Amino acid sequence: MTSAREAALKALLRVDSEGAYSNLALDHILTGLRLEPRERSLATTIFYGVLEKRITLDYVISRFSSTPLKKIMPVALELLRIGVYQILYLSKIPPSAAVNESVNLAKTCGARRASGFVNAVLRNFLRSGAKIPPLAPETDSVRRLSVEYSCPEWMISLWSRSYGDETALGLLKGMAQKPELFARVNNTRVGEEQLIERLREEGTGAESVLWPDHALRFLKGIDVAESGCYRDGLFHIQDLSSQILCALLDPQPGETLADVCSAPGGKTFTLAERMENRGKIFAYDKYPQKVKLVREGAHRLYLSCVRASVRDAAHPEENPEKADRVLCDVPCSGLGVIRRKPEIRFKLPGPIDSLPDLQYLILCKSSELVQNGGTLFYSTCTLNPAENGRVADRFLSEHPGFLPKAISLPESFPRAVAEPENQMTFLPHVHGTDGFFVAAFRKK
Ligand SMILES: C[S@@+](CC[C@H](N)C(=O)[O-])C[C@H]1O[C@@H](n2cnc3c(N)ncnc32)[C@H](O)[C@@H]1O
């Protein structure tokens, strides 16, 4: 029978070898296995923990292995990470059990010849006192932070350069925190208090958030597949940052909107709800299978004003009907959602460098959809000025037909980054949201 650690191993290998998204890789492995709830929870803890702490774990392994990391076969390396992770961070698991389980899995999961090596490295680590060994005194501060917070050096340098050392440190500390989970109440079907009560009956605690309206905070995790309220279309899961963007966009019933990068549909749904399902939202995405997700979500939530279809926002064949408000929630590097998707920290800076050109193109093309006097919003879930403020600044400087539209927020959302008043960067450790960026423009 597959154990929790074997499930975690398989999911980790999937992320490494196929570049799979963490949640999908884990779901894929766990579906089809009949693990006890406790085993399932251990598999999840080990899987996410190893991804989150990988840089720290690799540093530890490098100090106790005579073989350089790059030469260790993938299964053995992952088993070493799983072993060291449990020894360092899971105090309820006896260290000897952590070692034995990794060694046994090496024997049964395709790394039999490396099982002695896995045993030797883990036992060396235990004998040394099972602590993260100090770095050499000459190690520079970025490398130190990288090992301490398990964050790549290039990302730490980017954040220090862009936001200052203090904010960069805040981001690193925030990255290690468990993110809160929020829902957007489907106000076309249920009131906030009513939904809180219905969730309580299902055994899920939730409370209202002061702002924006119709946002709920879950008091513990929720398995949406098990929730009747979810199936009945009473809410969708959405971070506060996205809900705030939709509040700023402020669509009115009866208007026409275009959401040019809409899948899987979270913002489309909130916008449709804010419009009380009256008017039209053209929800586009480049990929047909993703458009299907938007259609299914709108159907579940009874949002008939959503019209989902395939369209390439960067190379549109023709421009459809103009809209009162247009949203460009562009593809981005996702550095603001590392708390939820730990594998994002292993993206390489090279591919990220090409994103601003695509983002700018999408923004320029989409600006042609805005009616005179209408508004245009640009957003990302990343913390990288090249994809954020620089795209927004360039748009204004090259489009005299648009003006900056000031963003003003309640006092509980103070500005944490010096930027023009039509831009706002949300930081997890300051605002309690995902890392997020919004820029707003008005067409003359
Ligand atoms: C950040 S996600 C959008 C999230 C979505 N707005 C939501 O709230 O659920 C970016 C989306 O852009 C889509 N995309 C990427 N390139 C595109 C393009 N050239 N045209 C249209 N959509 C594109 C991706 O498929 C992805 O679904």
Image: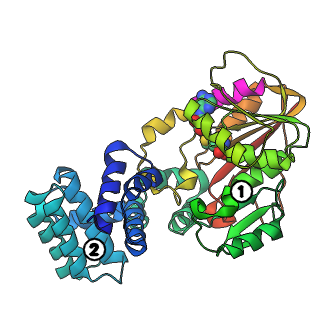
Where is residue 202, by image quadrant? bottom right
Residue 383: x, y in percent?
59, 50
The vertical placement of 421 against 90, above or below, is: above
**Residue positioned 42% across, 59% down in the render:** 142
Q: Nearer the viewer, residue 432 or 235?
A: 235
The vertical placement of 95 against 39, above or below, is: below
Q: Nearer the viewer, residue 43 or 51?
A: 43
Where is residue 415, by image quadrant? bottom right
Q: Residues within 10 Å of mark 1 (few under 14, many from 20)?
A: few
- Label 1 or label 2, whichever comes before in sequence order: 2
- Give the quarter the ligand 1 occupies: top right
- Residue highlighted by disc 1: 232
| Label 1 to label 2: alpha-carbon separation | 52 Å
Q: Residues within 10 Å of mark 2 (few under 14, many from 20)?
A: few
Q: Amino acid at mark 2?
A: Pro
**Residue positioned 41% across, 52% down in the render:** 28
In what element is the residue under mark 1?
loop
Q: Which mark is residue 133?
A: 2
Where is residue 40, by image quadrant? bottom left
Q: Amino acid at mark 1?
A: Asp
Q: Nearer the viewer, residue 63 or 361?
A: 361
**Residue positioned 43% across, 37% down in the render:** 350
Region in magenta: 358-368
Residue 49: x, y in percent?
40, 66
